[in-house]
Image: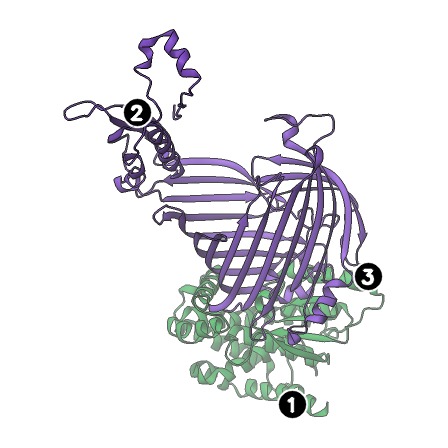
Chain colours: A purple, B green
Amino acid sequence: MGQIHAKEITSEERPTLDEEDPALHKHVFDGNNPVKVEHVHIDGLGRTKDDLVIRHMKDVLQAKTFKEVIQRTGEAKVKLEGLGVFKSVGVFIDTSKGDGSSAKGLDVTFNVKETRRLTGSAHTAVGNNEGSLVLGAKLPNTFGRAESLVAEYSRGTKHSSGFNVMLVKPIGQEFDKRLRGSVFKSSADYAPSSYRETGRGVTLDFTFPSFVGMSELQWEGVWRELSCLTRTASFATREQSGHSLKSSLKHTLTRDTRDERIYPSEGYLLKLSQEVAGYTGGDVKFWKEQIQLQVNKSLFWNCVLSGSLQGGVMKGISDTEVRLNDRFFVGGPTTVRGFNIHGLGPHTQGDYQGGEAFWAGALHLYTPLPFIKAGRGGFGDVFRTHFFVNAGNLTTLDTNNMFAWEDHLQKLRQNFRWSYGAGLVLRIGSIARFELNYCMPQAAQATDSICQGLQFGIGVNFL
Amino acid sequence: MSTLVQQAAEIHNNGSDTGGQPQIPENVELYQPYEGNQITLPEKAQCLAVKAFLKMCDIPFHIMLRSNAEQMSPSGAVPFIKAGADIVSEFDPIVEYVSKKGLSLSEELSGGQKSEMKAYMALSINRLYLAEMYLSWNVKETADQKTKQRYGSPYPWPLSLILPYLKQREAISYLKAHNSWQDFLPDQVYDEVNLCCKALSDKLGGEQYFFLDRPTELDALVYGHLKTLQMMEAEDKRLADMVNKYPTLVHFCDRIRDRYFIERERSR
């Protein structure tokens, strides 16, 4: 159900058909037969509004030949499925019947089955270095135009918890733009810096395609409460305790030409983001620029060479100090391997304080598992081995002399950390991955928290 | 409260075991909210009491004003002191901490006097504190026009509304937990203050200090609370008059102020 099987009869096949059974030929439509689509029926619409589906049917009605009808109904079916409001979409094409139907007339019937009004889910999710259980409820197609209302509650393995209620609405002619509003609460412990953060807030975002890639424009208003995890937390962390209100505008541009997200073999990913906080209210004021680049090149024997580079810089606006929970942190199995999570960079009394500028780079050589053939859906597709070299640095900036680029570059260059190693990569589904690496840190500072030997990482975004 | 004392003692023990000779580190800093437009009445009294205590012990300290002093404090209450790596919050734990370092204002007191002092601290001072909490958070007019405005002043909207509201709820449940003080009528609370003042005035009599010829923790606490009530004259005249009715207490406050807050500063 829900699939179209059709193919054009090639000139070699036709004579054989003719020879075997001349009677059959009459019923075979030639792909180039001129036809006219007279009616399009859509069966099974309940709460879905008509205008949502009608706009996708226009192309089908304009098809001139049988081949076009097949092609366009196929496209329309994919579009209908893409709305996410139907459980299944089936297509049935028949000659027109009834009064006034012409010999060339065709009727196209779409059999759709709507999703249930309320769906529930319980699944485990993987954030960066933390697993969590997510319980969710979803009202798909809430108001009949492909909107969805989603509520989720999650609880993580490291004392994190949160809930999120969001309403997503696709808009535009092609439904390729998306508006999303959400209300959330989340809290998590940041042990390397000895603090716990609880955030309650609202986000509004608008995602739209542009000629360079996907753009996302987001406004976030969040009340953050920061508290010390222990009585022995460093004084620098203690000084950051308290309430703050962040209202920020953020623009993210993503251009992704990779053929696959977890094990890409070709293509690149470029992600640029700018965030400005403070102009729209709140007492948190900074600007922040971040870049992420990943380039993949496939070599001989299914080996892939992959290079990644990340960097970021931020500054407090009008002489405000950048808060601990806004700063950059580097280190850990998903960024610079060979260092513990956030275990790199400025440090006081046992707590990592983060920095206002960072860079991190990595070069990977991914190879298939030895002796196991990578095939379709086999064991070898799930695993890869990789060899890597990665490096990075995190530093505070002298914000009084923001334009002393030479000094900043010098700071980022000197005492940078690097490590190399090898390991096993396992993909989990199509978005997350798991790594078990043997790391050899080569350059570190005395206050860094290094992880020599086996390091285990799980996450969505990897350096 | 007792757990705080224990925790403070633990922090202290950890420090002194490794440090050898117990000694108050040189750089003592006292953290409190901004005096001008942020600090609330009960907080101001607690801060002044600790300051008086430190002055009486002759421990030099710097006052550090932070709008997030309350959240910085390990116990969630102001003031707290930072002595070297040690952080101790609130009056009782600070007294305990200082005495562990070999400085005590009440060591010359006899056993009986010590328990009498503890009784006054528990009865009179706790009552004064409850009255301050009641008058600043549970009297609608004062809470809305003064206390909440002050408490929310460092924050942007809407936190300037949410945080004072949450603090008020906390204060009211604190009052509820102490013999249902939130059900009292304002007149009853003023009567309680009056009773406290009378008891303290009677105890003081014609003496300079409550015990012997030198100040103790009780003197610091009494000064902190009564002086704050006096200073709040502009906001609550009735409260200030309650103290001013007792000349012994007025003289006592003036004496402590002159001796520890004015003369000390001049001689430095």
Q: What residue type is labelled 2?
A: Ile
Q: What residue type is labelled 3?
A: Asp
Q: Mark 1 vs mark 3: which is more N-terminal?
A: 3
Q: What element carries label 3?
A: helix
In this view of the protein, which residue sits in the foreground, B86 or B192?
Answer: B86
Residue position marked by numbered label 3 in the rendering: B17
Q: What element carries label 1?
A: helix
Q: Which chain carries label 1?
A: B
Pick out the residue farthest to the left. A99
Q: Can residue B13 be seen in the rendering of this structure?
A: yes
In this view of the protein, which residue sits in the foreground, B220 or B50?
Answer: B50
In this view of the protein, which residue sits in the foreground, B76 or B247?
Answer: B76
In this picture, residue A413 sits left or right of residue A252? right
Q: Quadrant of the N terminus of chain B?
A: bottom right
Mark 2 and mark 3 in contact? Answer it, CB < 8 Å.
Answer: no
Disc 2 and disc 3: Cα gap in Å?
88 Å
The reply to whether label 2 and label 3 mark residues of one chain is: no
Residue position marked by numbered label 1 in the rendering: B262
Pick out the residue farthest to the right. B20
Q: Which amino acid does label 1 sit on?
A: Ile
Q: Position of residue B200 (x, y in %)?
A: 56, 78
In this picture, residue B187 sits left or right of residue A215? left
How many marks are shown on the rendered structure?
3
Q: Where is residue B30 in the image (x, y as percent from the top left)?
A: 65, 74
Q: What element carries label 2?
A: strand
Disc 1 and disc 3: Cα gap in Å?
37 Å
Q: Nearer the viewer, mark 2 or mark 1?
A: 2
Q: Where is residue B147 in the image (x, y as percent from the top left)?
A: 45, 73
Q: Which residue is drawn at 51% across and 84% down?
A: B231
Q: Toward which corner of the image does residue A31 lie, by quadrant?
A: top left
